[in-house]
Each structure stands twice: as structure tokens, then as C-alpha cells.
Amino acid sequence: MMQNESGPILYHCPDARSLRCLWAVEEAGIDVELKLLKFPPRAFEPDYRAVNPLMTVPGWVEHGHLMTESAAICERIAEGTPLEVRRDEADYWAWRNWLHRSDATLTFPLAIMIRYTRVEPEERRLRQAVDDYKAFFGGRARSIEAALADGREWLAAGRFTIADIVIGYAAFLATTLGAGDVLGDATKEWLARCTAREGFRRARERQKG
């Protein structure tokens, strides 16, 4: 496994799920070595298999250990910072649930949309699948709108945390896929706050290489 003795390595494709990790890095002020890959790595980056046999991004290498799940990597990055919600805080349980909802519930349908709009060759693209999974995402995105209905600025603990990063990425990705119209008004306003943050802007600038 590839390793960097001076600090973590983040393998990243622009605007892929690994953007969560790069955004968290920028918010936390952690030094990482960023390695940019072409998307999808399985098609364009054969040497990456030696690092991550799954051929997915993110890939996070630290002290010889590999992590491949974006929300888990964000948890690691948030340790000991205000991006983390501690167990003794009232919103701990909701915060933890948001972290896992980000991929299992919200990003999954968007991944199907990506496959059938960007990855598959033209003759294999399925408009019906795209429409169905857009609706699937819209139904589950109502949970964001419901959480924000009380006027809160951020999802948990009264401050910006990695819950906003991991869920915010899913909402941002939806807008790049033509699914932003299924987001509620409060969700759109919250997403605008997320993407206006300097950490998000730095992450997107840094991924340009």
C-alpha cells in the first residue's frame, strides 16, 4: 500500500464523493497530500488498484491504513474539532444518523443517475432509470427539509459540522444532475450557505490541480 510518512494522502476525482473529504480537510485545516485521478478510476487509473482494490474514490491512506468510505473519512478528519459532535452533546444521535444517511439513503440514487447519464455509453443510457431515481432521491431529501423546518442554520448542534458536509455534498451533487428542483426551499437556502463557505470554495479550487 502506498503511504506518506509526513501525513495523510487523499485520492480524489473532481466533484466525486471524495469532495466531501477534501471539503472537510479545508474546513479542519489539515495538511494532506492530494492525488487527483481521472473519473472513473477503474477505467483510467490502473495503478490505483495497488492502493485501493475497489478502484473507488475517496481513498484515504494514513499510517499505512486505507479508508474508502467518504463519511467515515470525514469522521476521522473531524476528530477533536468543532466539525465533530461529541457523545455528550444533545444532537450527537441525530448527527451520527446524518453521517450514515448521506450515502446509504441520499447518494445511492444519485449514483444510479450518474451511471445512466455520464458513465454508460450512449446506447446503454436509461432515461426511465434516471427519472425514477430522481424521484427516489426527492422523497428521501424531504428529511433534510423537515430537519430545517424549525429555522435552524445548520443540521446539528447549532453549528456547521461534517453532517452539513456529507449531506450538503449529496444536495450539491443533485444540482449538478438536474435534480435540484426536488429540493425544498429551506434545503436550497441551507445548501447556499454550505457552498458559500470558504472551505467549500477552497476545496473546489484545489481540485482543479
Image (cartoon, rainbow, N blue to C red):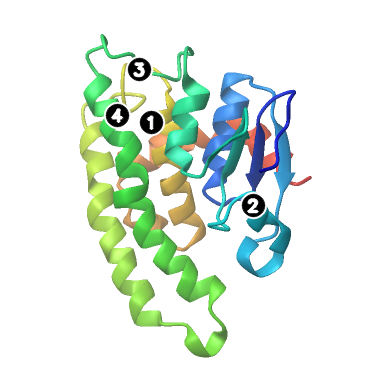
Residue type at numbered disc 1: Ala
Q: Earlier in the sequence, mark 4 or mark 3?
A: 3
Q: Position of residue 89 (x, y in %)?
A: 26, 11
Q: Earlier in the sequence, mark 4 or mark 1?
A: 4
Q: CA distance from mark 3 to mark 2?
A: 28 Å
Residue type at numbered disc 3: Val
Q: Nearer the viewer, mark 1 or mark 2?
A: 2
Q: CA distance from mark 1 to mark 3?
A: 9 Å
Circle 4 residue = 96
Please state, as top left, top right, bottom left or bottom right, where the C terminus lies in the image: top right
Circle 2 residue = 13
Observer able to see residue 193: no
Q: Earlier in the sequence, mark 1 or mark 3?
A: 3
Label pair 1/3, CB-CB below 8 angstroms: yes
Give the SS element for disc 1. helix
Q: Residue at position x 47%, y 47% from top?
A: 172
Q: Nearer the viewer, mark 4 or mark 1?
A: 4
Circle 1 residue = 163
Q: Residues within 10 Å of mark 1 (few under 14, many from 20)?
A: many
Label pair 4/3, CB-CB below 8 angstroms: yes
